[in-house]
Image (cartoon, rainbow, N blue to C red):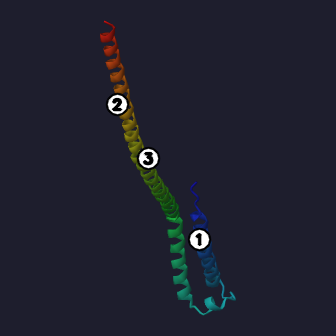
């Protein structure tokens, strides 16, 4: 079963970006934000960071489905790889069984041949005895 967690990851990243963006937007609107890191930036720096965060938000939103597609393809490749490995294993097992069965078939043919020889020998002995008996009875 294919499990996709990329939506959660992207949503988490988007939340972070949007959170930082909202902090900067608030800072741009009002100088009363208590965050020490943000307070050290100038208005122009905050504007630049806000633009970057807005672009990041846009890009993450626009290409969110690409991560899902990548995860699906990774799962698909893993599935194909496992299937191929399984088939190789089955192929090896079948090859071993074919070799084994070929040896057993040869053994059975040998037994059959020996049996046929014994039967022929017995049949020929009986035939000779019958011929000898019929000559003697005449």
Q: Secondary structure at mark 2?
A: helix
Q: CA distance from mark 1 to mark 3?
A: 57 Å
Q: Point out which mark residue 97 bears.
A: 3
Q: Quadrant of the C terminus?
A: top left
Element assignment for label 1: helix
* Residue at x 56% of width, y 91% of height: 42
Mark 1 and mark 2 in contact (Cβ < 8 Å)? no
Toward the bottom, the furthest residue is 40
Few, some or many residues within 10 Å of mark 3 (<14, 14–19, 20+): few
Q: Is residue 39 above or below residue 138?
A: below
Q: Is residue 12 above or below residue 32?
A: above
Earlier sequence position, callout 1 versus callout 3: 1
Relative to 2, residue 115 above or below: above
- The residue labelled by disc 1 is 14
Locate residue 71 relative to residue 92 in the image: left or right: right
Badge 3 element: helix
Q: CA distance from mark 2 to mark 1?
A: 86 Å
Q: 64 or 38, which is in the foreground? A: 64
**Where is mark 2, residue-wise?**
117
Residue 110 position in % (x across, y down): 37, 38
Image point (62%, 90%), residue name: 37
Give the CA distance from mark 3 to mark 2. 30 Å
Label whose residue precedes the other's in the sequence (3 or 2): 3
């Amino acid at each position: 079963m294919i499990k996709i967690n990329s939506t959660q990851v992207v949503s988490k990243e988007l939340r972070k970006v949007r959170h930082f963006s909202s902090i900067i937007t608030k800072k741009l609107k009002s100088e009363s934000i208590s965050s020490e890191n943000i307070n050290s930036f100038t208005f122009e720096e905050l504007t630049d960071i806000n633009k970057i965060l807005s672009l990041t938000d846009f890009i993450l939103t626009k290409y969110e489905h690409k991560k899902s597609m990548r995860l699906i393809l990774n799962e698909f490749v893993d599935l194909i790889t496992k299937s191929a490995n399984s088939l190789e294993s089955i192929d090896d097992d079948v090859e071993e069984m074919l070799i084994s069965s070929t040896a057993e078939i040869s053994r059975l043919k040998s037994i059959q041949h020996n049996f046929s020889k014994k039967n022929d020998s017995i049949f020929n002995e009986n035939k000779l005895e019958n011929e000898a008996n019929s000559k003697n009875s005449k």
